[in-house]
Image (cartoon, grey):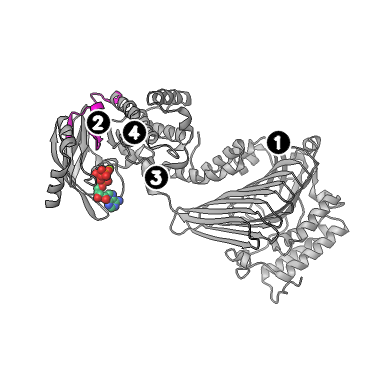
């Protein structure tokens, strides 16, 4: 494929190339990984940063939004304890029973991670930085898969600059009883870029829940690029959950890319409350018949936050099911973007795809942009999509107030109810309650 | 005591209440009947404080206080309760959570202690039982998928939990089967007390066999056209609203 060669580079675009040149020698990896990085940076150099004339980036012009490129963060001795994690993620996520893996300031923190316990439970797991020095075949395969998507600039940059992360493989038929909680933190008082890459490989029949949470220790200027690839073999089940509570000044660019085998399930769920600019991309590709995905979540944004959720689901084989439900609560001048592409190839008969996005606008200056794209090339399919945008229902508000609830409390209850519907997709009361607490926290109310 | 004097109210620029006078002393139950569209629900909304109902003239005092000056939640705290003709469905809010928030909000506003979870649950269970409400129903989202009768019973449950001083019941009997009508009426009668005033809006004399009113008023064209004792309801059942309708079109 011939990528269009960019004639002119902005300063920030050049800075990203310089960042790579400067860091290249220190980046972890064997010769093969180095070659991978070189190829990825060339892909980036050819394409540049995506801007509004690139259809997939219509509402989020990265070339305009990125103002600078802070140095790569790599700091080993950031103080991280329970109180720091609690402050960064909230008490509910601190308390979640899980195997913990911590990445702080761009460094994998073995001292804070339950790697031993995960291995005892049968999971093959390690720090990405270490594994890059001699990657096992399954990890190399993950990179190859991601490489097929590196026309996505976020992935290309990530491949070029990835430093830390976790790679894990769930052997056949293993059911992990507790979720894995991957905690991404920044660094107090510093400005920096973090490129993390995680890889999950689920062998046939394996199942696990992976929670990725992003919180702040008080970075001043954070640019985060985080990519997680998931390869879900036949009959496996991966539940992938995210809490994004970055610093309010941060840039948060992430991709989850999943390949889903026959009769496997991949569910993704994301809640965003942080970051000045967030772009969450989720790619799901069905490789085997009878597979299913549910991609849901909620965005709570205020001030001048910009939060973009972009989904691409590829139905390449028959009889797969996809469900998408995203809700956005937008206050002040916040802008929410939802793009959902569903591709149904000619072979993918009996596809069942549904998509819904709903925004609740709390102010007249908030903005919601929604772009569903259904590309259907098969005839025997059921596909539907919808997008709504509205204000709080005054009649419902009156009903609650007539029962004694003060206006602010009544509004908060209605907003929670609106968002709460997405939590049902989790089908997990403990995690659902934790998200309910995140929403209550955002609304400034106390749950009892 | 509720005192309504010369009340005028507009909705969407249209005058619906048109010089309404009504006084309900403490301890009394008054019924309001009247043709469709005469302004009965409008009166109930004005009393509860719905925003789009603009009062253009007149006054409403409750226990000597200016009711029209209060926010809807302040009115609830002051003891005003409206059982809605059409209760709202609120997906995502569990009925139990809603009941608890309402009870505690009102208690807080009245300067009382919030109820503990066990105390609250005990109270709800007991009151729900009297109204033949299955406790399982209260775990569902508020009024969502409730039958018409279930919604009405849920309104009366809320009323008994909030212990209001002024109960306004807007067609609580519509949609109730005969057994439910008995149960609901018993629930309402249990709340009758020397301190409590009630305003019962209905189209059917039958309800007034169960909840026997002290006074009956006929509302027509946004004002009280006639008042009398319980026998007035029987008379209306016979004669209908024809004479008020004529008066209406003549006016
Ligand atoms: N929001 C509104 N906008 C415009 N007109 C309204 C509105 N609400 C009520 N009205 C009108 O006001 C009049 C009185 O309505 P209201 O609901 O008070 O009547 P009602 O006596 O309760 O009737 P019913 O017996 O049918 O319940 C009706 O003509 C109705 O159409
Ligand atoms: Mg009415």
- In 3D space, how far apart are the residues under numbered discs 4 and 3 (Cα atoms)? 23 Å
**Figure quadrant of residue B40:** top left
Q: CA distance from mark 1 to mark 2?
A: 61 Å
- For label 1, being within 8 Å of ligand 1 is answered no
Residue positioned 28% across, 33% down in the render? B167
Q: Are marks 4 and 3 in contact (CB under 8 Å)?
A: no
Res A76 visible: no
Q: Residue B202 colored magenta?
A: yes
Residues B182 and A63: in front is B182
Q: Secondary structure at mark 3?
A: helix
Looking at the image, do the residues carrying marks 4 and 2 touch, with CB atoms under 8 Å apart? no
Tag 2 near tag 3, CB within 8 Å: no
Q: Is residue B56 magenta?
A: no
Numbered badge on residue A396: 3
Q: Which residue matches tag 1?
A: A178
Q: Earlier in the sequence, mark 4 or mark 2?
A: 4
Q: Which residue is mark 4?
A: B176
């Amino acid at each position: 494929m011939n990528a269009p060669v960019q004639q002119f580079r902005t300063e920030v675009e050049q800075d990203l190339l310089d960042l790579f040149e400067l860091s290249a020698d220190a980046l972890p990896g064997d010769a093969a990984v180095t070659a991978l990085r070189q190829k990825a940076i060339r892909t980036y150099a050819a394409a540049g940063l995506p801007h509004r004339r690139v259809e997939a980036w219509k509402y989020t012009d990265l070339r305009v939004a990125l103002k600078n490129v802070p140095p790569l963060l790599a700091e080993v001795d950031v103080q991280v304890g329970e109180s720091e994690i609690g402050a960064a993620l909230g008490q509910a996520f601190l308390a979640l029973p899980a195997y913990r893996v911590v990445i702080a300031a761009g460094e994998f923190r073995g001292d804070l991670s339950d790697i031993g316990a995960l291995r005892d439970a049968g999971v093959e797991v390690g720090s990405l930085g270490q594994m890059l020095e001699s990657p096992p075949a399954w990890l190399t395969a993950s990179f190859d898969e991601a490489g097929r998507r590196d026309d996505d600039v976020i992935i290309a940059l990530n491949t070029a600059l990835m430093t830390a992360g976790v790679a894990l493989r769930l052997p056949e038929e293993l059911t992990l009883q507790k979720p894995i909680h991957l905690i991404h933190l920044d660094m107090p008082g510093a400005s920096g870029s973090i490129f993390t890459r995680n890889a999950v490989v689920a062998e046939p029949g394996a199942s696990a829940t992976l929670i990725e949470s992003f919180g702040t220790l008080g970075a001043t200027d954070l640019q985060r690029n985080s990519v997680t690839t998931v390869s879900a073999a036949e009959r496996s089940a991966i539940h992938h959950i995210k809490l994004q509570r970055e610093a309010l000044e941060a840039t948060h660019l992430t991709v989850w890319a999943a390949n889903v085998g026959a009769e496997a399930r991949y569910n993704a769920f994301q809640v965003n409350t942080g970051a000045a600019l967030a772009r969450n991309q989720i790619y799901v590709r069905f490789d085997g018949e009878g597979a299913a995905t549910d991609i849901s979540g909620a965005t709570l944004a205020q001030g001048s936050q910009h939060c973009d959720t972009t989904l691409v689901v590829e139905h390449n084989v028959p009889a797969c099911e996809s469900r998408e439900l995203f809700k956005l609560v937008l206050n002040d001048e916040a802008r929410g973007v939802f793009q959902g592409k569903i591709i149904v190839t000619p072979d993918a008969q009996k596809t069942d795809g549904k998509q819904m996005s709903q925004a609740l606008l709390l102010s007249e200056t908030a903005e919601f942009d929604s772009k569903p794209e259904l590309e259907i090339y098969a005839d025997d399919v059921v596909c539907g999509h919808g997008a709504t945008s509205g204000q709080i229902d005054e009649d419902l508000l009156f009903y609650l107030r007539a029962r004694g609830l003060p206006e602010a409390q009544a509004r908060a209850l209605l907003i929670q109810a609106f968002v709460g519907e997405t939590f049902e997709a989790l089908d997990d009361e403990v995690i659902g309650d934790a998200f309910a607490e995140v929403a209550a926290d955002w609304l400034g109310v106390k749950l009892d | 005591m509720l005192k309504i004097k010369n009340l005028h109210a507009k909705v969407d620029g249209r005058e619906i209440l048109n010089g309404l006078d009504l006084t309900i002393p403490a301890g009394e139950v008054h019924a309001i009947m009247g043709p469709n569209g005469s302004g009965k629900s409008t009166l109930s909304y004005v009393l509860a404080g719905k925003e789009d109902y603009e009062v253009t003239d007149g006054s409403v005092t409750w226990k000597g206080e200016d009711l029209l000056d209060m926010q809807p939640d302040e009115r609830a705290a002051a003891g005003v309760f409206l059982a809605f003709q059409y209760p709202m469905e609120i997906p995502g809010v569990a009925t139990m959570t809603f009941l608890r928030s309402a009870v505690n909000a009102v208690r807080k506003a009245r300067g009382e202690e919030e109820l503990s979870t066990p105390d609250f649950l005990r109270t709800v269970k007991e009151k729900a039982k009297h109204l033949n409400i299955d406790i399982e129903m209260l775990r569902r989202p508020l009024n969502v998928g409730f039958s018409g009768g279930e919604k009405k019973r849920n309104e009366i449950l809320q009323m008994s939990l909030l212990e209001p001083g002024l109960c306004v019941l807007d067609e609580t009997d519509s949609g109730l089967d005969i057994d439910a009508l008995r149960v609901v009426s018993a629930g309402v009668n249990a709340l009758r007390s020397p301190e409590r005033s009630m305003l019962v809006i209905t189209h059917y004399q039958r309800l007034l066999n169960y909840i026997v009113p002290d006074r009956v008023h006929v509302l027509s064209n946004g004002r009280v056209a006639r008042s009398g004792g319980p026998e007035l309801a029987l008379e209306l059942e016979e004669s209908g609203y024809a004479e008020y309708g004529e008066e209406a079109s003549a006016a």
